[in-house]
Amino acid sequence: MSLTKSEFKVLQALSDTGEPLTQRDLAETCGLSLGAVNSAVQSCKQAGLVEDGRITERGIEALEPHRVRNAVIMAAGLSSRFVPLSYERPKGMLRVRDEVLIERQIRQLLERGITDITVVVGYKKEYFFYLAAKYGVKIVVNDQFAEKNNSWTLWLVRDRLSNTYVCSSDDYFTVNPFERYVWKSYYASEYAAGPTEEWCIEAGPRDRITGVTVGGSDSWVMLGHVYFDHDFSERFAPLLDEAVSHAENSGKLWEAIYADNIKTLDMEIRRYPEGVIHEFDSLAELEDFDPDFIENVDSEIFDNIVSVLGCTCEEISDFYPMSQGLTNLSCHFRVGDDEYVYRHPGIGTEKFMNRVAETQANTAARELGVDRTFIHEDERRGWKICRFVPNAHTLDPTDPSQVKRAMELCRRFHESGATIDSEFDFFSDGVGYENLLKTHGPIDIPGYFELRDKIVRLNDFSAADGYGLCFSHNDYLPLNFLFDEEGGLDVIDWEFAGMSDPGNDFGTFVICSEYDREQADAALAYYFGRTPTFEERRHFWSRVVLGGWCWYVWALEKEAEGAGVGEWLYIYYSYATNYVDMVLDWYENGEAA
Protein backbone atom coordinates (compact mmCIF):
# COMPACT_ATOMS: atom_id res chain seq x y z
CA MET A 1 0.00 0.00 0.00
CA SER A 2 1.27 3.47 -0.89
CA LEU A 3 1.02 5.80 2.08
CA THR A 4 0.31 9.51 2.26
CA LYS A 5 2.76 11.54 4.30
CA SER A 6 0.23 11.96 7.13
CA GLU A 7 -0.48 8.20 7.18
CA PHE A 8 3.25 7.53 7.26
CA LYS A 9 3.77 9.86 10.22
CA VAL A 10 0.93 8.24 12.18
CA LEU A 11 2.24 4.73 11.54
CA GLN A 12 5.80 5.82 12.30
CA ALA A 13 4.76 7.27 15.65
CA LEU A 14 2.79 4.16 16.60
CA SER A 15 5.70 1.94 15.55
CA ASP A 16 8.17 3.91 17.66
CA THR A 17 6.10 3.74 20.84
CA GLY A 18 4.59 0.27 20.46
CA GLU A 19 1.75 1.57 22.60
CA PRO A 20 -1.68 3.00 21.71
CA LEU A 21 -1.75 6.77 21.33
CA THR A 22 -4.65 9.21 21.43
CA GLN A 23 -5.20 11.39 18.41
CA ARG A 24 -4.10 14.37 20.46
CA ASP A 25 -0.85 12.56 21.35
CA LEU A 26 -0.39 11.70 17.67
CA ALA A 27 -0.95 15.30 16.63
CA GLU A 28 1.75 16.48 19.03
CA THR A 29 4.20 13.72 18.06
CA CYS A 30 3.66 14.01 14.31
CA GLY A 31 3.42 17.78 14.10
CA LEU A 32 0.02 17.50 12.40
CA SER A 33 -3.32 19.12 13.08
CA LEU A 34 -5.99 17.10 14.84
CA GLY A 35 -8.00 17.10 11.63
CA ALA A 36 -5.12 15.66 9.62
CA VAL A 37 -4.48 13.03 12.29
CA ASN A 38 -8.15 12.05 12.40
CA SER A 39 -8.25 11.62 8.64
CA ALA A 40 -5.01 9.61 8.58
CA VAL A 41 -6.10 7.35 11.46
CA GLN A 42 -9.44 6.62 9.79
CA SER A 43 -7.85 5.70 6.47
CA CYS A 44 -5.30 3.52 8.26
CA LYS A 45 -8.07 1.74 10.17
CA GLN A 46 -9.97 1.09 6.96
CA ALA A 47 -6.87 -0.40 5.39
CA GLY A 48 -6.19 -2.58 8.43
CA LEU A 49 -3.01 -0.75 9.33
CA VAL A 50 -4.20 0.43 12.74
CA GLU A 51 -6.42 -1.35 15.25
CA ASP A 52 -7.34 -0.26 18.78
CA GLY A 53 -4.84 2.58 18.60
CA ARG A 54 -1.96 0.26 17.75
CA ILE A 55 -0.10 -0.45 14.54
CA THR A 56 -0.83 -3.86 13.04
CA GLU A 57 1.46 -6.31 11.23
CA ARG A 58 0.00 -5.00 8.01
CA GLY A 59 0.87 -1.49 9.13
CA ILE A 60 4.48 -2.58 9.74
CA GLU A 61 4.52 -4.04 6.21
CA ALA A 62 3.24 -0.73 4.83
CA LEU A 63 6.19 1.04 6.48
CA GLU A 64 8.72 -1.41 5.03
CA PRO A 65 9.56 0.61 1.86
CA HIS A 66 10.49 3.48 4.17
CA ARG A 67 12.70 1.45 6.51
CA VAL A 68 16.28 2.68 6.80
CA ARG A 69 18.57 0.00 5.45
CA ASN A 70 22.00 1.27 6.40
CA ALA A 71 24.26 4.21 7.11
CA VAL A 72 27.48 5.53 5.64
CA ILE A 73 29.77 7.66 7.79
CA MET A 74 32.35 9.66 5.84
CA ALA A 75 35.60 9.88 7.81
CA ALA A 76 38.28 10.19 5.14
CA GLY A 77 39.01 13.94 5.13
CA LEU A 78 42.01 15.89 6.39
CA SER A 79 40.00 18.43 8.48
CA SER A 80 42.64 21.04 7.70
CA ARG A 81 40.65 23.81 9.40
CA PHE A 82 40.91 21.96 12.69
CA VAL A 83 44.63 22.34 13.21
CA PRO A 84 46.65 21.48 15.18
CA LEU A 85 44.61 18.61 16.60
CA SER A 86 44.00 17.19 13.12
CA TYR A 87 47.78 16.75 12.81
CA GLU A 88 47.56 14.13 15.54
CA ARG A 89 44.25 12.37 14.93
CA PRO A 90 41.21 12.59 12.65
CA LYS A 91 38.60 15.09 13.73
CA GLY A 92 35.98 12.37 14.17
CA MET A 93 38.16 10.81 16.90
CA LEU A 94 38.09 13.89 19.14
CA ARG A 95 36.46 13.49 22.53
CA VAL A 96 33.73 16.10 23.05
CA ARG A 97 31.71 16.24 26.28
CA ASP A 98 33.43 13.00 27.22
CA GLU A 99 32.36 11.10 24.08
CA VAL A 100 34.33 10.34 20.91
CA LEU A 101 32.46 12.08 18.09
CA ILE A 102 32.15 9.15 15.72
CA GLU A 103 31.36 6.71 18.52
CA ARG A 104 28.50 8.89 19.73
CA GLN A 105 27.06 8.95 16.22
CA ILE A 106 27.42 5.17 15.80
CA ARG A 107 25.63 4.61 19.11
CA GLN A 108 22.81 6.93 18.04
CA LEU A 109 22.36 4.90 14.85
CA LEU A 110 22.40 1.63 16.77
CA GLU A 111 19.78 2.98 19.17
CA ARG A 112 17.43 3.27 16.19
CA GLY A 113 18.11 -0.27 15.03
CA ILE A 114 20.43 0.73 12.20
CA THR A 115 23.18 -1.87 12.46
CA ASP A 116 24.52 -1.94 8.89
CA ILE A 117 27.02 0.91 9.20
CA THR A 118 29.94 1.57 6.84
CA VAL A 119 32.75 3.96 7.79
CA VAL A 120 34.83 5.27 4.87
CA VAL A 121 38.29 6.20 6.14
CA GLY A 122 41.38 7.79 4.60
CA TYR A 123 43.50 10.25 6.58
CA LYS A 124 45.03 8.43 9.58
CA LYS A 125 42.73 5.53 8.74
CA GLU A 126 44.25 3.25 11.36
CA TYR A 127 42.59 5.32 14.12
CA PHE A 128 39.19 4.00 13.03
CA PHE A 129 39.94 0.32 12.61
CA TYR A 130 38.98 -0.59 16.18
CA LEU A 131 35.37 0.42 15.45
CA ALA A 132 34.87 -2.77 13.44
CA ALA A 133 35.43 -4.95 16.51
CA LYS A 134 33.77 -2.61 19.01
CA TYR A 135 30.58 -1.81 17.07
CA GLY A 136 30.51 -4.24 14.14
CA VAL A 137 30.85 -1.50 11.51
CA LYS A 138 32.36 -2.13 8.08
CA ILE A 139 35.51 -0.24 7.07
CA VAL A 140 36.15 0.99 3.52
CA VAL A 141 39.48 2.68 2.77
CA ASN A 142 39.68 5.75 0.53
CA ASP A 143 43.33 5.84 -0.53
CA GLN A 144 42.82 9.01 -2.59
CA PHE A 145 41.51 11.19 0.22
CA ALA A 146 44.24 13.81 -0.30
CA GLU A 147 43.62 14.22 -4.04
CA LYS A 148 39.84 13.89 -4.27
CA ASN A 149 36.84 15.27 -2.41
CA ASN A 150 33.88 13.59 -0.72
CA SER A 151 32.26 12.68 -4.05
CA TRP A 152 34.98 10.02 -4.37
CA THR A 153 34.32 8.84 -0.81
CA LEU A 154 30.64 8.38 -1.65
CA TRP A 155 31.44 6.77 -5.01
CA LEU A 156 33.39 4.05 -3.21
CA VAL A 157 30.16 2.94 -1.48
CA ARG A 158 27.72 3.75 -4.30
CA ASP A 159 26.47 0.15 -4.35
CA ARG A 160 25.32 0.53 -0.72
CA LEU A 161 23.15 3.60 -1.28
CA SER A 162 19.47 2.72 -0.83
CA ASN A 163 17.46 4.09 2.09
CA THR A 164 20.77 5.21 3.54
CA TYR A 165 21.83 7.82 6.07
CA VAL A 166 24.95 9.62 4.87
CA CYS A 167 26.79 11.22 7.78
CA SER A 168 30.04 12.99 8.62
CA SER A 169 32.17 11.50 11.37
CA ASP A 170 32.69 14.84 13.12
CA ASP A 171 29.05 15.88 13.60
CA TYR A 172 27.61 16.14 17.09
CA PHE A 173 23.84 15.84 17.56
CA THR A 174 22.51 16.97 20.94
CA VAL A 175 19.44 14.76 20.38
CA ASN A 176 19.30 11.60 18.30
CA PRO A 177 18.17 12.65 14.80
CA PHE A 178 17.97 9.16 13.35
CA GLU A 179 14.76 7.22 12.73
CA ARG A 180 13.89 3.62 11.81
CA TYR A 181 11.60 4.80 9.05
CA VAL A 182 11.98 7.90 6.87
CA TRP A 183 9.36 9.34 4.51
CA LYS A 184 11.75 10.36 1.73
CA SER A 185 15.17 11.84 0.94
CA TYR A 186 16.13 14.92 2.93
CA TYR A 187 19.04 17.15 3.84
CA ALA A 188 19.25 18.30 7.47
CA SER A 189 19.18 22.06 7.90
CA GLU A 190 19.38 24.80 10.49
CA TYR A 191 18.57 28.47 10.08
CA ALA A 192 21.53 30.86 9.81
CA ALA A 193 20.72 34.46 10.73
CA GLY A 194 22.82 37.06 8.96
CA PRO A 195 25.60 36.41 6.42
CA THR A 196 26.83 32.84 6.06
CA GLU A 197 29.34 30.98 3.89
CA GLU A 198 27.37 27.72 4.21
CA TRP A 199 25.34 26.15 1.40
CA CYS A 200 21.97 27.91 1.46
CA ILE A 201 18.77 26.07 0.56
CA GLU A 202 15.80 27.28 -1.45
CA ALA A 203 12.65 25.20 -0.96
CA GLY A 204 9.38 25.09 -2.84
CA PRO A 205 5.98 23.54 -2.09
CA ARG A 206 6.02 20.57 0.28
CA ASP A 207 9.59 21.47 1.28
CA ARG A 208 11.18 20.11 -1.90
CA ILE A 209 14.66 21.61 -2.34
CA THR A 210 14.62 23.69 -5.52
CA GLY A 211 17.95 25.46 -5.34
CA VAL A 212 21.29 25.56 -3.54
CA THR A 213 23.71 28.48 -3.40
CA VAL A 214 27.10 28.69 -1.71
CA GLY A 215 26.86 31.57 0.75
CA GLY A 216 23.98 33.89 1.48
CA SER A 217 22.18 35.59 4.30
CA ASP A 218 19.28 34.78 6.63
CA SER A 219 18.79 31.36 5.14
CA TRP A 220 18.25 27.72 5.95
CA VAL A 221 21.61 26.00 5.34
CA MET A 222 22.81 22.45 4.73
CA LEU A 223 24.06 21.21 8.07
CA GLY A 224 24.54 17.71 9.35
CA HIS A 225 23.35 14.40 7.98
CA VAL A 226 21.44 13.54 4.82
CA TYR A 227 19.11 10.70 3.85
CA PHE A 228 19.05 8.99 0.44
CA ASP A 229 15.88 7.00 -0.18
CA HIS A 230 15.80 4.23 -2.77
CA ASP A 231 14.48 6.37 -5.62
CA PHE A 232 16.99 9.15 -4.98
CA SER A 233 19.84 6.63 -4.82
CA GLU A 234 18.81 5.01 -8.10
CA ARG A 235 18.93 8.37 -9.85
CA PHE A 236 21.97 9.78 -8.09
CA ALA A 237 24.41 6.85 -8.37
CA PRO A 238 24.78 7.07 -12.19
CA LEU A 239 25.26 10.85 -11.97
CA LEU A 240 27.94 10.34 -9.32
CA ASP A 241 29.59 7.66 -11.45
CA GLU A 242 29.65 9.95 -14.48
CA ALA A 243 31.03 12.91 -12.50
CA VAL A 244 33.95 11.10 -10.87
CA SER A 245 35.02 9.60 -14.19
CA HIS A 246 36.30 13.04 -15.22
CA ALA A 247 39.60 14.18 -13.70
CA GLU A 248 38.46 17.81 -13.55
CA ASN A 249 35.85 16.80 -10.95
CA SER A 250 38.39 15.40 -8.47
CA GLY A 251 37.81 18.29 -6.09
CA LYS A 252 34.03 18.31 -6.44
CA LEU A 253 31.72 17.73 -3.49
CA TRP A 254 28.87 15.28 -3.90
CA GLU A 255 26.57 18.12 -2.88
CA ALA A 256 27.72 20.04 -5.96
CA ILE A 257 26.82 17.08 -8.18
CA TYR A 258 23.39 17.02 -6.53
CA ALA A 259 23.00 20.79 -7.01
CA ASP A 260 23.88 20.43 -10.72
CA ASN A 261 21.04 17.95 -11.12
CA ILE A 262 18.57 19.33 -8.62
CA LYS A 263 15.62 19.36 -11.04
CA THR A 264 15.73 15.59 -11.46
CA LEU A 265 16.71 14.69 -7.89
CA ASP A 266 13.85 14.92 -5.41
CA MET A 267 15.00 15.82 -1.90
CA GLU A 268 13.30 17.63 0.96
CA ILE A 269 14.65 20.05 3.51
CA ARG A 270 14.48 18.73 7.09
CA ARG A 271 14.51 21.70 9.45
CA TYR A 272 16.03 21.34 12.92
CA PRO A 273 15.91 23.79 15.84
CA GLU A 274 19.05 25.78 16.57
CA GLY A 275 21.62 23.90 18.63
CA VAL A 276 20.69 20.35 17.64
CA ILE A 277 23.34 19.87 14.95
CA HIS A 278 26.96 20.89 15.46
CA GLU A 279 29.66 20.88 12.79
CA PHE A 280 32.69 22.35 14.51
CA ASP A 281 34.58 24.34 11.88
CA SER A 282 37.26 25.54 14.28
CA LEU A 283 38.77 24.83 17.64
CA ALA A 284 37.16 28.01 18.96
CA GLU A 285 33.68 26.73 18.03
CA LEU A 286 34.35 23.47 19.82
CA GLU A 287 35.58 25.29 22.92
CA ASP A 288 32.39 27.37 22.98
CA PHE A 289 30.37 24.15 22.92
CA ASP A 290 32.56 22.25 25.38
CA PRO A 291 34.42 24.69 27.67
CA ASP A 292 36.31 21.80 29.29
CA PHE A 293 37.62 20.48 25.97
CA ILE A 294 41.02 22.19 25.99
CA GLU A 295 41.64 21.41 29.65
CA ASN A 296 40.96 17.71 29.04
CA VAL A 297 42.29 17.31 25.50
CA ASP A 298 44.87 14.58 25.03
CA SER A 299 47.24 16.42 22.71
CA GLU A 300 50.98 16.17 22.53
CA ILE A 301 51.04 19.39 20.51
CA PHE A 302 49.39 21.35 23.33
CA ASP A 303 51.78 19.75 25.79
CA ASN A 304 54.71 20.85 23.61
CA ILE A 305 53.51 24.45 23.47
CA VAL A 306 52.94 24.56 27.23
CA SER A 307 56.40 23.14 27.95
CA VAL A 308 58.20 25.65 25.70
CA LEU A 309 56.23 28.84 26.37
CA GLY A 310 55.35 28.20 30.01
CA CYS A 311 51.65 28.92 29.46
CA THR A 312 48.52 26.90 30.23
CA CYS A 313 46.35 25.10 27.68
CA GLU A 314 43.57 27.58 28.36
CA GLU A 315 45.81 30.49 27.29
CA ILE A 316 46.44 28.99 23.83
CA SER A 317 44.03 30.24 21.17
CA ASP A 318 43.50 31.48 17.60
CA PHE A 319 44.65 28.42 15.73
CA TYR A 320 44.40 28.45 11.97
CA PRO A 321 46.27 26.60 9.22
CA MET A 322 48.95 28.39 7.27
CA SER A 323 49.99 27.67 3.70
CA GLN A 324 51.62 24.28 3.77
CA GLY A 325 55.10 23.62 2.45
CA LEU A 326 56.26 20.61 0.49
CA THR A 327 57.51 18.78 3.58
CA ASN A 328 55.66 20.04 6.68
CA LEU A 329 52.39 21.34 8.11
CA SER A 330 52.21 24.63 9.98
CA CYS A 331 49.60 26.53 11.93
CA HIS A 332 49.26 29.88 13.66
CA PHE A 333 48.39 30.22 17.34
CA ARG A 334 48.35 32.91 20.00
CA VAL A 335 49.26 33.08 23.66
CA GLY A 336 48.06 36.35 25.12
CA ASP A 337 49.20 39.15 22.81
CA ASP A 338 52.01 37.10 21.27
CA GLU A 339 51.63 35.16 18.02
CA TYR A 340 53.47 31.99 17.06
CA VAL A 341 53.79 29.29 14.42
CA TYR A 342 53.79 25.59 15.23
CA ARG A 343 55.55 23.40 12.64
CA HIS A 344 54.45 19.76 12.46
CA PRO A 345 56.72 17.37 10.51
CA GLY A 346 55.21 16.00 7.31
CA ILE A 347 54.66 12.40 6.30
CA GLY A 348 57.89 10.55 5.55
CA THR A 349 60.21 13.44 6.46
CA GLU A 350 61.97 11.33 9.07
CA LYS A 351 63.53 9.34 6.21
CA PHE A 352 65.57 12.21 4.85
CA MET A 353 65.57 14.99 7.46
CA ASN A 354 68.39 15.36 9.96
CA ARG A 355 66.53 17.11 12.76
CA VAL A 356 69.63 17.39 14.96
CA ALA A 357 71.40 19.31 12.20
CA GLU A 358 68.29 21.41 11.61
CA THR A 359 68.17 22.38 15.29
CA GLN A 360 71.85 23.36 15.18
CA ALA A 361 71.24 25.37 12.01
CA ASN A 362 68.21 27.15 13.48
CA THR A 363 70.26 28.05 16.55
CA ALA A 364 73.18 29.30 14.46
CA ALA A 365 70.88 31.34 12.21
CA ARG A 366 69.27 32.93 15.27
CA GLU A 367 72.66 33.80 16.77
CA LEU A 368 73.74 35.36 13.46
CA GLY A 369 70.55 37.42 13.35
CA VAL A 370 69.55 35.72 10.09
CA ASP A 371 66.43 34.08 11.59
CA ARG A 372 65.02 36.02 14.52
CA THR A 373 61.79 33.99 14.53
CA PHE A 374 63.21 30.72 15.86
CA ILE A 375 62.31 29.73 19.44
CA HIS A 376 62.57 25.95 19.86
CA GLU A 377 62.83 22.69 17.94
CA ASP A 378 62.56 19.13 19.19
CA GLU A 379 65.54 17.52 17.47
CA ARG A 380 64.14 14.01 17.96
CA ARG A 381 60.57 14.42 16.70
CA GLY A 382 60.92 17.45 14.45
CA TRP A 383 58.23 19.82 15.78
CA LYS A 384 59.19 23.47 16.04
CA ILE A 385 57.86 26.73 17.49
CA CYS A 386 58.67 30.11 15.97
CA ARG A 387 57.46 33.65 16.35
CA PHE A 388 54.80 34.70 13.86
CA VAL A 389 55.66 37.78 11.81
CA PRO A 390 52.44 39.77 11.26
CA ASN A 391 51.83 41.36 7.87
CA ALA A 392 55.00 39.81 6.51
CA HIS A 393 55.61 39.28 2.84
CA THR A 394 57.90 36.84 1.07
CA LEU A 395 60.60 37.74 -1.40
CA ASP A 396 59.64 38.92 -4.87
CA PRO A 397 62.26 37.42 -7.21
CA THR A 398 61.46 40.07 -9.82
CA ASP A 399 62.42 42.91 -7.46
CA PRO A 400 66.18 43.59 -7.87
CA SER A 401 66.46 45.34 -4.51
CA GLN A 402 65.05 42.33 -2.67
CA VAL A 403 67.18 39.89 -4.65
CA LYS A 404 70.28 41.96 -3.86
CA ARG A 405 69.54 41.80 -0.13
CA ALA A 406 68.98 38.05 -0.34
CA MET A 407 72.26 37.45 -2.14
CA GLU A 408 74.23 39.72 0.20
CA LEU A 409 72.71 38.02 3.25
CA CYS A 410 73.54 34.64 1.75
CA ARG A 411 77.20 35.56 1.36
CA ARG A 412 77.26 36.96 4.90
CA PHE A 413 76.29 33.69 6.57
CA HIS A 414 78.47 31.73 4.13
CA GLU A 415 81.47 33.75 5.38
CA SER A 416 80.35 33.85 9.04
CA GLY A 417 82.48 30.90 10.13
CA ALA A 418 79.40 29.19 11.67
CA THR A 419 79.51 25.41 11.63
CA ILE A 420 77.09 22.55 12.27
CA ASP A 421 77.64 18.79 12.49
CA SER A 422 76.18 17.93 9.11
CA GLU A 423 77.08 18.18 5.46
CA PHE A 424 74.74 18.55 2.49
CA ASP A 425 75.91 17.76 -1.02
CA PHE A 426 73.59 17.90 -4.01
CA PHE A 427 75.06 14.80 -5.62
CA SER A 428 75.53 12.51 -2.60
CA ASP A 429 72.19 13.54 -1.09
CA GLY A 430 70.54 13.05 -4.47
CA VAL A 431 71.97 9.52 -4.53
CA GLY A 432 70.50 9.01 -1.06
CA TYR A 433 67.06 10.06 -2.32
CA GLU A 434 67.61 7.77 -5.30
CA ASN A 435 68.22 4.81 -2.98
CA LEU A 436 65.00 5.59 -1.15
CA LEU A 437 63.22 5.80 -4.49
CA LYS A 438 64.49 2.35 -5.44
CA THR A 439 62.77 0.84 -2.40
CA HIS A 440 59.50 1.45 -4.25
CA GLY A 441 60.67 -0.53 -7.28
CA PRO A 442 63.03 -0.20 -10.27
CA ILE A 443 63.47 3.27 -11.76
CA ASP A 444 62.14 2.91 -15.32
CA ILE A 445 61.68 6.58 -16.19
CA PRO A 446 62.71 7.24 -19.82
CA GLY A 447 65.98 9.16 -20.02
CA TYR A 448 66.65 8.94 -16.27
CA PHE A 449 69.98 7.14 -16.46
CA GLU A 450 71.22 9.13 -19.46
CA LEU A 451 70.72 12.29 -17.39
CA ARG A 452 72.32 10.65 -14.38
CA ASP A 453 75.48 9.83 -16.36
CA LYS A 454 75.84 13.50 -17.28
CA ILE A 455 75.25 14.53 -13.67
CA VAL A 456 78.06 12.22 -12.52
CA ARG A 457 80.49 13.84 -14.98
CA LEU A 458 79.41 17.34 -14.00
CA ASN A 459 79.74 16.58 -10.29
CA ASP A 460 83.32 15.44 -10.82
CA PHE A 461 84.15 18.71 -12.58
CA SER A 462 82.37 20.81 -9.94
CA ALA A 463 84.06 19.04 -7.03
CA ALA A 464 87.47 19.60 -8.62
CA ASP A 465 86.94 23.38 -8.49
CA GLY A 466 88.07 23.22 -4.88
CA TYR A 467 85.37 25.27 -3.16
CA GLY A 468 85.37 24.62 0.58
CA LEU A 469 82.28 23.93 2.66
CA CYS A 470 80.41 26.71 4.44
CA PHE A 471 77.28 27.10 6.54
CA SER A 472 74.45 26.95 3.99
CA HIS A 473 70.66 26.97 3.95
CA ASN A 474 70.27 24.67 0.91
CA ASP A 475 66.57 25.49 0.52
CA TYR A 476 67.14 29.14 -0.30
CA LEU A 477 63.91 29.94 -2.13
CA PRO A 478 61.69 33.06 -2.16
CA LEU A 479 59.03 31.57 0.14
CA ASN A 480 61.62 31.14 2.89
CA PHE A 481 62.27 34.89 3.15
CA LEU A 482 60.10 37.03 5.43
CA PHE A 483 60.15 40.82 5.20
CA ASP A 484 58.46 42.43 8.21
CA GLU A 485 56.61 45.75 8.33
CA GLU A 486 59.82 47.64 9.13
CA GLY A 487 61.71 46.03 6.24
CA GLY A 488 63.59 43.57 8.44
CA LEU A 489 64.50 40.28 6.77
CA ASP A 490 64.50 36.76 8.20
CA VAL A 491 65.37 33.50 6.47
CA ILE A 492 63.28 30.63 7.82
CA ASP A 493 63.01 26.83 7.43
CA TRP A 494 66.56 25.51 7.87
CA GLU A 495 65.71 21.82 7.70
CA PHE A 496 68.02 21.12 4.73
CA ALA A 497 70.88 23.18 6.19
CA GLY A 498 74.40 21.83 6.32
CA MET A 499 78.03 22.54 5.59
CA SER A 500 77.86 22.80 1.82
CA ASP A 501 79.28 24.23 -1.36
CA PRO A 502 78.50 27.99 -1.39
CA GLY A 503 76.89 27.57 -4.80
CA ASN A 504 74.08 25.44 -3.36
CA ASP A 505 72.06 28.38 -2.09
CA PHE A 506 72.46 30.25 -5.36
CA GLY A 507 71.41 27.14 -7.32
CA THR A 508 68.27 26.61 -5.26
CA PHE A 509 67.37 30.30 -5.44
CA VAL A 510 67.66 30.31 -9.24
CA ILE A 511 65.59 27.14 -9.64
CA CYS A 512 62.81 28.12 -7.25
CA SER A 513 62.65 31.64 -8.67
CA GLU A 514 62.33 30.02 -12.13
CA TYR A 515 65.01 32.34 -13.46
CA ASP A 516 66.34 32.43 -16.99
CA ARG A 517 70.09 32.86 -17.66
CA GLU A 518 70.01 36.65 -17.59
CA GLN A 519 68.16 36.80 -14.27
CA ALA A 520 70.44 34.17 -12.74
CA ASP A 521 73.59 35.99 -13.82
CA ALA A 522 72.26 39.24 -12.30
CA ALA A 523 71.66 37.46 -8.98
CA LEU A 524 75.17 35.99 -9.08
CA ALA A 525 76.67 39.47 -9.56
CA TYR A 526 74.76 40.59 -6.42
CA TYR A 527 76.25 37.64 -4.52
CA PHE A 528 79.83 38.57 -5.42
CA GLY A 529 79.25 42.31 -5.38
CA ARG A 530 80.89 42.44 -8.80
CA THR A 531 80.90 40.68 -12.15
CA PRO A 532 81.94 37.07 -11.45
CA THR A 533 84.84 35.48 -13.34
CA PHE A 534 84.12 32.79 -15.93
CA GLU A 535 85.31 30.10 -13.50
CA GLU A 536 83.05 31.43 -10.72
CA ARG A 537 80.08 31.62 -13.06
CA ARG A 538 80.74 28.11 -14.37
CA HIS A 539 80.98 26.66 -10.88
CA PHE A 540 77.85 28.35 -9.56
CA TRP A 541 75.91 27.30 -12.67
CA SER A 542 77.04 23.72 -12.03
CA ARG A 543 75.25 23.96 -8.69
CA VAL A 544 72.07 25.02 -10.49
CA VAL A 545 72.16 21.84 -12.56
CA LEU A 546 73.17 19.58 -9.67
CA GLY A 547 70.50 21.18 -7.48
CA GLY A 548 67.88 20.62 -10.16
CA TRP A 549 68.82 16.94 -10.30
CA CYS A 550 68.95 16.54 -6.51
CA TRP A 551 65.53 18.10 -5.98
CA TYR A 552 64.14 16.20 -8.97
CA VAL A 553 65.06 12.86 -7.38
CA TRP A 554 63.79 14.11 -4.02
CA ALA A 555 60.47 14.98 -5.67
CA LEU A 556 60.26 11.54 -7.29
CA GLU A 557 60.71 10.00 -3.85
CA LYS A 558 58.00 12.26 -2.40
CA GLU A 559 55.66 11.23 -5.23
CA ALA A 560 56.38 7.57 -4.52
CA GLU A 561 55.56 8.17 -0.84
CA GLY A 562 52.18 9.58 -1.85
CA ALA A 563 53.03 13.18 -0.93
CA GLY A 564 53.18 14.70 -4.40
CA VAL A 565 54.84 18.05 -5.08
CA GLY A 566 52.84 18.99 -8.19
CA GLU A 567 54.51 21.15 -10.84
CA TRP A 568 57.77 21.32 -8.89
CA LEU A 569 58.69 17.86 -10.12
CA TYR A 570 58.97 19.21 -13.67
CA ILE A 571 60.56 22.51 -12.63
CA TYR A 572 63.40 20.68 -10.88
CA TYR A 573 63.80 18.29 -13.80
CA SER A 574 63.92 21.10 -16.35
CA TYR A 575 66.83 22.90 -14.66
CA ALA A 576 68.85 19.70 -14.71
CA THR A 577 68.10 18.80 -18.32
CA ASN A 578 68.02 22.29 -19.87
CA TYR A 579 71.44 23.38 -18.63
CA VAL A 580 73.52 20.25 -18.08
CA ASP A 581 74.94 20.19 -21.62
CA MET A 582 75.77 23.90 -21.51
CA VAL A 583 77.72 23.66 -18.25
CA LEU A 584 79.48 20.44 -19.26
CA ASP A 585 80.58 22.21 -22.42
CA TRP A 586 81.99 25.07 -20.34
CA TYR A 587 84.07 22.60 -18.36
CA GLU A 588 85.18 20.56 -21.34
CA ASN A 589 85.80 23.37 -23.85
CA GLY A 590 86.43 26.44 -21.73
CA GLU A 591 85.16 29.99 -21.94
CA ALA A 592 84.93 29.89 -25.75
CA ALA A 593 82.01 27.45 -25.48
Image (cartoon, rainbow, N blue to C red):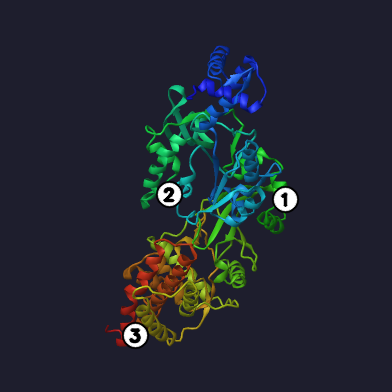
Label located before the other in sequence (3 or 1) = 1
Q: CA distance from mark 3 to mark 1?
A: 60 Å
Residue lying furthest left: 592
Report the disc number at residue 312.
1
Q: Secondary structure at mark 3?
A: helix
Q: Report which quarter residue 126 is drawn in.
A: bottom right
Query: Which residue is more in the foreground, 8 or 542?
Result: 8
Residue 404: % across, % down: 42, 66
Residue under pointer 2 = 251
How many residues crowd mark 1 within 10 Å: few (<14), some (14–19), many (20+)? Answer: some
Is 134 rendered above or below residue 16?
below
Residue type of the residue flagged with mark 2: Gly
Q: Secondary structure at mark 2?
A: loop
Residue type of the residue flagged with mark 3: Tyr
Residue under pointer 3 = 587
Residue 427: % across, % down: 45, 79
